[in-house]
Amino acid sequence: MGIGHYIRPVERPFTRAERERVTCLFGGLTARHDALILAAFRGLGYRGARIPTPTKADFQTGKEYCNPGMCNPAYFTVGALVNYLKRLRDDAGLSTEAVLRDYAFVTAGSSGPCRFGMYESEFRLGLRNSGFDGFRVLAFQQKGGVRQSNQTCGLTIDGEFAVTLLTSLMLGDLLNDTANRIRPYERIPGQTDRVFGRVLDRLRDRLCAWGHRSSRPGIPARLVASMAPGMTPGQVQKVLRQLLGAYFTTALEECAALINEEIEVDYTRPKPICKVIGEFWAQMTEGDGNFNMFSFLETQGAEAHAPTIMTWANYLLDVAQCTLMDEKGRAEHPGPRTCGAFVSRARQRLARQKRLAGLALIAKTLNREYERMRLALGGLAHPQLAPAELRRLANPYFDYRIAGGEGYLEVAKTIYYSMNHLAHMILSLKPFGCLPSTQSDGAQAAVRARYPDINFVPVETSGDGDINAYSRVLMALGDAKTRCKDEFEACLKRTGYSLDTIRRFCQEHRELRRPLQQVPRSDGVVGRAANFVLHVASVMDANPAWERLKHAGPDRGRIRAGVSTSAAGYVQIWSDSEESVS
């Protein structure tokens, strides 16, 4: 029996004629990201539905129907898809034929040394084993650019699709980052999630309406379309309107005003800052796939910062540019000294320079848009990190040419957060047996030898083992809390004011209780509360009535009850005894 090459199964096509009938399923990111992507899909004229955040039951389903030895993101994701289709069949009353005909799953594909490159085949295997053989899996390559479909394809991946999708991802990044920085300090529990639910609804409406908007393309749009194959002048007009207009920034400014009006914070409560890094899916999901780690960290008194998808997009663009630069060195190796060879090398050099210029333009445009939106939402979210700087930091420990997973990002982020005093603790989340993240963990030993103050803890996630993971995290979090408390007390001592005095000043100045206020960072100070008391003290120093209380010691015997600080009637009571830092 001969050995033949593997041939990819022929997928039943999803055609444009089916677009109004077939529902595109997707999921795997955070709830806000998925909700915004769904709005973007609908705005582009697709029917869409979100698969709920995977649970442990989905993990068991994935293990049942997939190959052994896969990483848990595959099991969780495949299981969530299969269980969703089973609910359509068993609970909604659809036949298997109707599910196969009217639904399709949209996901990202890849290649390389990571098992992520095998996800598409695992989806097909799990679907076949669970009774949904022939269910369509529409995979677009994350490095495939904006032209991955033909004229008859139902999922049109072009410039308009890419810009709309990236806009929804940027909005999701900003909402998540901003909410995570506010929630630990909210005065009314649950108020941040309630307000951000309204913010999310506004942005979803904007995204959906923006997809349906159309206008007559002008001369600039026609000129750009002539140089951008695969895009019509109407699509180019929409992209230019996004890049040059204020459609989303105006909406974000309105959302920022709503956040400042409806939420009150107390930034005088010290919380250790925990930066989460690791494998892409494990550091993004909000459910059982990473042991619900973000909610766990917050319940334990930490301020947890989730990574952004735009950091990953910048990484992919940087890797593509570095690959072209490496090709340049190989291409310029001396060859035959003939006229034909010279012309061929000149054409290759010109094509390479055009691609490099295009990638640089895309990166600059994306980061410009992200920064515009970040500032419109109040500027509390962290700006994007420069990929070239991250690559430089990681290079002594992790070669940027090593592909798979997040490459050099894990090592680079650890060093960056340490050097710039941005975290009391760094938590690396990755699936059990993840090869790229295991490589990064090996390099982290050298990093910690160079930066001994780094509080770094790696955690492997799976469908079980929650207690062991929480135990490891709590050990590192205890150290982070001690660092945070010592730092806060040192900064409070520097101010010369008591904590009660600073809180009383904040009580009388509404702007100091707004969540989106700009708090300057002091050199070497990590925590938000520590930076905040230094900032408030500088404001108080400019007020003679308050400056006299400097070095006066703790304010005792004062009770300020019944002071309404919000529309919800929150009452702040100052106790007789001096409040300790906890």
Image (cartoon, rainbow, N blue to C red):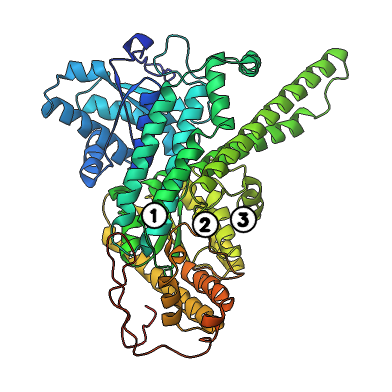
- Residue at the (38%, 11%) spot, across then down: 16
What amino acid is labelled 3 in the image? Answer: Tyr
Q: Is the residue 38 above or below the residue 552 in the image?
A: above
| Lower position in the chain sequence, tag 1 or tag 2 | 1
Instruction: Find residue 467 and report its image quarter.
Output: bottom left
Where residue 86 sits: x, y (%)? 17, 29
Few, some or many C-alpha atoms within 10 Å of disc 2 (few <14, some 14-19, many ≥20)? few
C-alpha distance separating marks 3 and 1: 46 Å
Q: How would you rate the neighbour count of disc 1 (Cα within 10 Å): few for under 14, some for 14-19, many for 20 or more?
A: some
Q: Amino acid at mark 1?
A: Glu
Question: Does dot 2 land on a helix, a strand or a loop?
Answer: helix
Which label was assigned to residue 227?
Answer: none
Residue depicted at 68% across the width and 32% down the height = 324
Upstream in sequence: badge 2 or badge 3: 3
Mark 1 vs mark 2, CA separation in Å:
47 Å
State which mark lies toward you, 1 or 2.
1
Q: Position of residue 485 (x, y in %)?
A: 44, 77
Q: Which residue is mark 1?
A: 261
Disc assigned to residue 442 = 2
Residue sitting nearer the eye, 408 or 122: 408
Establish if 206 lies above or below 407.
above
Q: Quadrant of the C terminus?
A: bottom left
Residue at 46% x, 70% y is 529
Which residue corresponds to mark 3?
397
Q: Amino acid at mark 2?
A: Gly
Which corner quadrant holds the N terminus?
Answer: top left
Q: At which x and y percent is residue 162?
A: 50, 27
